[in-house]
Amino acid sequence: MVRIFVTGGTFDKNYDEISGRLAFKDTHLLEMLRLGRSRVPVSVRTLMMIDSLDMTDADRQLIVRNCQQCEETCIVVTHGTDTMVETAAALARGVEGKTVVLTGAMIPYAFGSSDGLFNLGSALSFVQVLPPGVYIAMNGQHFAWDQVRKNRESGIFETI
Amino acid sequence: MVRIFVTGGTFDKNYDEISGRLAFKDTHLLEMLRLGRSRVPVSVRTLMMIDSLDMTDADRQLIVRNCQQCEETCIVVTHGTDTMVETAAALARGVEGKTVVLTGAMIPYAFGSSDGLFNLGSALSFVQVLPPGVYIAMNGQHFAWDQVRKNRESGIFETI
Amino acid sequence: MVRIFVTGGTFDKNYDEISGRLAFKDTHLLEMLRLGRSRVPVSVRTLMMIDSLDMTDADRQLIVRNCQQCEETCIVVTHGTDTMVETAAALARGVEGKTVVLTGAMIPYAFGSSDGLFNLGSALSFVQVLPPGVYIAMNGQHFAWDQVRKNRESGIFETI
Amino acid sequence: MVRIFVTGGTFDKNYDEISGRLAFKDTHLLEMLRLGRSRVPVSVRTLMMIDSLDMTDADRQLIVRNCQQCEETCIVVTHGTDTMVETAAALARGVEGKTVVLTGAMIPYAFGSSDGLFNLGSALSFVQVLPPGVYIAMNGQHFAWDQVRKNRESGIFETI
């Protein structure tokens, strides 16, 4: 059983047609798992629906606490890319003996051209086979939490 | 470096608008890697573009030979789902010391509702971390080549 | 009020994932109207779900009779492109005092790259403003029923 | 020959993956015409790429002048929905003897779930058959410029 914690991020941004702005509504995660015809047993829980630039320390502690306390030892966290590395560090400090994989998207799933489905397939696969630790899965690659940064100009995660 | 061998299958079926039938043209693989923003170094080669129901022993031997002879030790093979298990068995008999992951799709990528991008993200991730052997990656899961069958009625791969 | 008669055609072809073939299930018409946010009052009825190459004279008479007998004077008929011109001729012989617009698609709606939504928007607009008569609306154009043929090689409707 | 003037609006909003915000880049109009397999002879010109809430009187005069001075008598203007009615009024005051149809979208075309292709098919059809005048084509309907308003709460254009 894989636990999936949803925290928002580009992954789940929607276009609000009344305001003409991007906004969060419900997560697309279940729809994406259906589309991918995933047969991985999962249990999904939405912790928050926010832009990761707005994520506070309290939010991060909530994520850490949920990863500590859940029964599952394989955990995927969907997360905005901008502060994914910070949350990964918080998780590495607080969670032991579990495989935690953070993933996200550069383009909202609701857009036809999203990388979200690819990333979800990737994260869900990595989490099943990587040894305990905290990882970021983006662009088909996985990175240990302390060996990665997001290049803000190119939007790409790279090894440091 | 991951080697990707393309053999056709539902993954790459197109709608031919003149004949009104499904047909193979070029592979969508590079387009899918672009959409997924994959940063995994890959080298792609199309071996054939056929429905796996039409795959002959000679075709299978061609796939085996290519997997033996390529430099890479991580190999993804895109393949029709109907005889994916047979090709996996042929690969298991003929390839040693390499991680080979077969994947495919239930719905053509050219359809909006394809599981292909999810499966590609999954296969590309499994191949980077699984020990040498031959595997099938479908529905977010991976199966050893000799512990899986496709349930023809449900279209689902299941452990045997 | 516009009456829409559904007869199948490429418009409504689906990919059957168990057989790996194209097949008809339910019409996508209501979903397309929702996607287009159509506010045109319509009443939709599925008369048949067939490839227009399989359409018999009896099928055509059924379409003609339905167009004669319905209350509405504005009628859209979704139809396979291969014999759309034949059905248009049958309608022209049998229906008077009504505006009937036949439309279809070169690529199934279920494919991401379908022309179906464009054609539906077009047909639904033409039917509201054209004088009584039988027309084909394809590729953003409208043709009188007796001044058009489908070029089988290019897949394009052209004036004769 | 139909002239198409592009002014931006939701139609053409893109997701900028570096900033994580909606932004304008190039118009999607040619891609949409290709997808719709439009065979209507058109000549497309981008006048501006802005949110219609940011449109000034000077911008509107630029649109009016272009509609006056172009050779074509059938003109489609793609436009944000929020001030489409204002621009329609400016066009009605300034343009004579031509059929001008404004259209737009509630959801950006770049989103899979856009109404844009439907509206484009609709506008391009109405412009070919409506008598000279200024119209708004949305939701499959057409409205004379002085008999319509956008309901800001529902996002729907309605007759006044």
Image: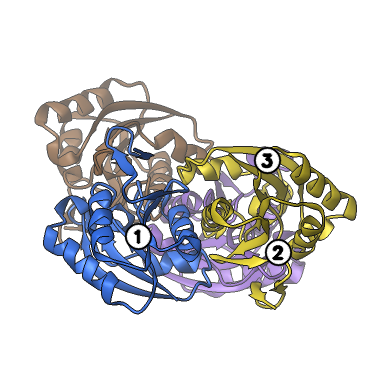
Chain colours: A yellow, B blue, C brown, D purple
Q: Quadrant of the C terminus of chain B?
A: top left
* Measured Cα–Cα span from mark 3 to mark 1: 35 Å
Measured as percent of width and height from the top left, residue A137 is found at 61, 61
Residue appearing at x 66%, y 62% in the figure:
A136
Q: Disc 3 vs disc 1: which is toward the camera?
A: 3
Along the viewing direction, whichever of B34 and D51 lies nearer the viewer: B34
Q: Residue D19 occupies which quadrant of the picture? A: bottom right
* Amino acid type for the residue under numbered disc 1: Arg
N-term mark: 2 or 1: 2
Spatial separation of the CA atoms under disc 2 and disc 1: 32 Å
Q: Which residue position is annotated with label 3?
A: A26
Q: Is residue B52 visible?
A: yes
Secondary structure of the residue carrying tag 3 is loop
Mark drawn on residue D20: 2
| Residue type for callout 2 | Gly
Q: Is residue A108 left or right of residue C89?
A: right
The x, y position of residue D135, in whole percent, is 56, 51
